[in-house]
Image (tube, helix red, strand yellow):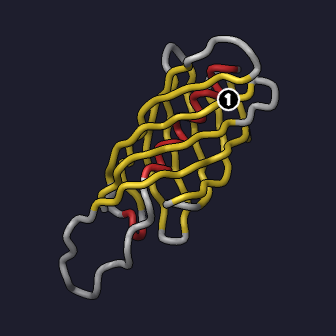
């Protein structure tokens, strides 16, 4: 279960990479790609577990505030997908992470996250970043921070 929780953290970090984009393009005008650098924080909790698959959710704050939904797969590596719901649209992505501490109630981790698309102002978005955090094996609480760049 410990490895399952860590995977959830990695997934959440992906959407937290960047701030919300500026207002959408005016009618009929082409819009150049814009790049944003930023950070986000999230606290996730388990919604459902089935074998090596975890579903986790929680609030995100920072440059890209909203609600995160992540589906995580636990195996020899931790990886998963995420959607972050914001007032400007949805951002989709994937990520992976490794544990730094093996044992104890609180474990730390780090990894990478990648934005792969979205809807609304995040349509066509892509980006990469790093994620960091901790996992409480007793309460299953995941706290994470992401830093990265998002292009819309």
Query: Who is closer to the viewer here, 45 or 71?
Result: 45
Q: Position of residue 31 (x, y in %)?
A: 21, 74
Q: Residue at the location (45% across, 30% down)?
A: 111
- Image coords of residue 69 (percent x, y): 60, 48
Q: Within 10 Å of the Cα at label 1, are there few (<14), some (14-19), or many (20+) other Cα atoms?
A: many
Residue at point 70% right, 20% down?
1
Of residues 43 and 1, the one nearer the viewer is 43
| Residue at 81% in and 25% down | 138
Name above or below for residue 21 compared with residue 142: below
Helix, strand or loop under label 1: strand
Position of the C terminus by quadrant: bottom left
Q: Which residue is mark 1?
A: 135
**Taking 95 as reference, is 66 above or below it?**
below
Left or right, 89 with respect to 30, comes to: right
User: Residue 54: image x %, image y %?
Assistant: 64, 32
Image coords of residue 131 (percent x, y): 48, 37
């Amino acid at each position: 279960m410990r490895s399952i929780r860590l995977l959830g953290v990695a997934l959440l970090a992906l959407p937290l990479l960047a701030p919300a984009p500026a207002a959408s393009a005016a009618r009929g005008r082409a819009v150049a790609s814009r790049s944003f650098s930023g950070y986000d924080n999230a606290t996730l909790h388990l919604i459902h577990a089935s074998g090596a698959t975890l579903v986790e959710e929680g609030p995100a704050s920072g440059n890209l505030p909203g609600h995160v939904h992540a589906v995580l797969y636990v195996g020899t590596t931790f990886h998963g997908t995420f959607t972050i719901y914001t007032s400007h649209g949805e951002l989709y992505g994937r990520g992976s992470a490794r544990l730094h501490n093996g044992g104890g109630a609180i474990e730390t981790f780090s990894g990478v996250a990648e934005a792969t698309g979205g809807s609304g102002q995040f349509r066509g978005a892509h980006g990469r970043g790093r994620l960091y955090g901790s996992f409480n094996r007793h309460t299953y609480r995941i706290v994470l921070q992401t830093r990265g760049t998002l292009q819309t």
